[in-house]
Amino acid sequence: MQVKRWCLPVDKSVGEQTRKQLLEEGVLDRLCRIRSDGDNLLIPVTKYIEGAVCEEFSCIPSKTVLPRFEQVGGIAIMQEDDKIGAEAVLASKKTYHTVLFADSAVEGPFRTKKFRVLAGIDTTATEYTEYGRHFFIDLSLAYFSARLSGERQRILSMMNEGERVIDMFAGVGPFAIALAGKASVVYACDINPEAVILMVRNIAKNHLTNIVPILSDAMNLPVIITQPADRIIMNLPLHSIPFLEAAFSMTRPGGMIHLYALVSHEEEYVPVLRTFPLKKLEHRYVRSYSPDRFHVVYDIIRG
Ligand code: SAM
């Protein structure tokens, strides 16, 4: 449906910045679609403001008006500090109990974010289910992202029955618990005590008896685990290079290391990886992170 609305014409280079500013000022008309007009964007507003002109816009059907968010169990994490939008998100699904806004980037050795509650119950804890596996999560205490669920399934499908697996940076256990179904044993290490406490709960919740949770710096693993592994997971995207020596020392020849990294081009880690004994090295795009960086996984067969 076409409707006449006040709108602010702005150059495309400042479009996103202006949209955010209008949103903060509470005058962005979220029921109409922003549209382009030559080099300009026409941003619809709810009332006349200086510089506004009247133009035609198409309406967004009400159920798609929700702001962008990521879902983790009963929690919705919004990218903008927008309380009105948060209330709409909360009301959009019965299972949402809380809407959060991340007040910081992923930070510190535990890779956690600071969160602010925008709507709903005052908590950062929730329960999450992935391919029939159940997890207790507390986003302010320990890192968790549902975005690698496809990767966990991909690695599970590559595994042979009875493999010995090491998850060097295990968090609350999503990789360890996913892979335990085929493994003989999974050693799951994390340096964050809160992550390990949640991981132990998650192991029990999934009735698993072949995961060994380890509260340690992963650098210590070569002295803790003495038998070689068939497969190693390294999911510490910005800081994993110093741990490669430990990972290679724990993998049997022919065994596999999955190294997750944040890069600006897919081959970025190849030169450093070539300094280790390799039989095969493949890399694949996992997901975008920012306009100029993305997550990649290096699947490495040790020589
Ligand atoms: N693999 C988990 C997942 O997919 O949800 C967690 C990944 S998170 C990006 C990285 C984890 O590594 C965090 O839980 C952090 O506490 C842990 N970590 C950071 N430095 C570590 C170290 N030196 N040794 C062991 N764990 C570490």
Image (cartoon, rainbow, N blue to C red):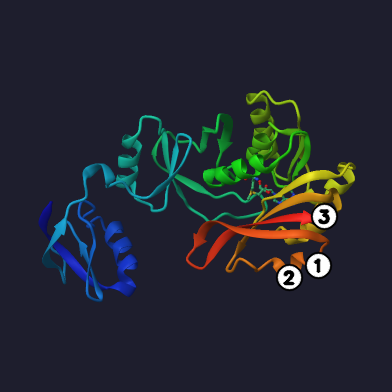
10 Å crowding of disc 2: few (<14), some (14-19), many (20+):
few
The residue singled out by tag 3 in the image is 248
Q: Which residue is mark 2?
A: 271
Instruction: Say if disc 2 is inside 8 Å of ligand 1.
Output: no
The quadrant of the picture occupied by the C terminus is: bottom right
Taking 282 as reference, is 98 above or below it? above
Q: Is residue 171 visible?
A: no
In the rendering, which numbered label is found on residue 28?
none
- Looking at this view, name the residue that lies furthest to the top: 207
Task: List x then y, in percent, for residue 159.
Answer: 70, 40
How many angstroms separate mark 2 from mark 1 (CA)? 7 Å
Q: Label 3 crowding class (10 Å Cα cut-off): few <14, some 14-19, many 20+?
A: many
Percent across and percent down for residue 173 are: 66, 38
Taking 232 as reference, is 268 left or right?
Answer: left
Residue type marked 3: Phe
Q: Dividing the picture into quarters, in which one does residue 283 lie?
A: bottom right
Q: Earlier in the sequence, mark 2 or mark 3?
A: 3
Secondary element at tag 2? helix
Q: Does the rendering let one see residue 91?
A: yes
The one nearer the camera, 253 or 91, is 253
User: What type is the residue that disc 1 sits on?
Assistant: Thr
Q: Which tag, 1 or 3, sits closer to the chain's start? A: 3
Look at mark 1 in the image and give the residue it sits on.
275
- C-beta proximity under 8 Å, tags 2 and 1: yes
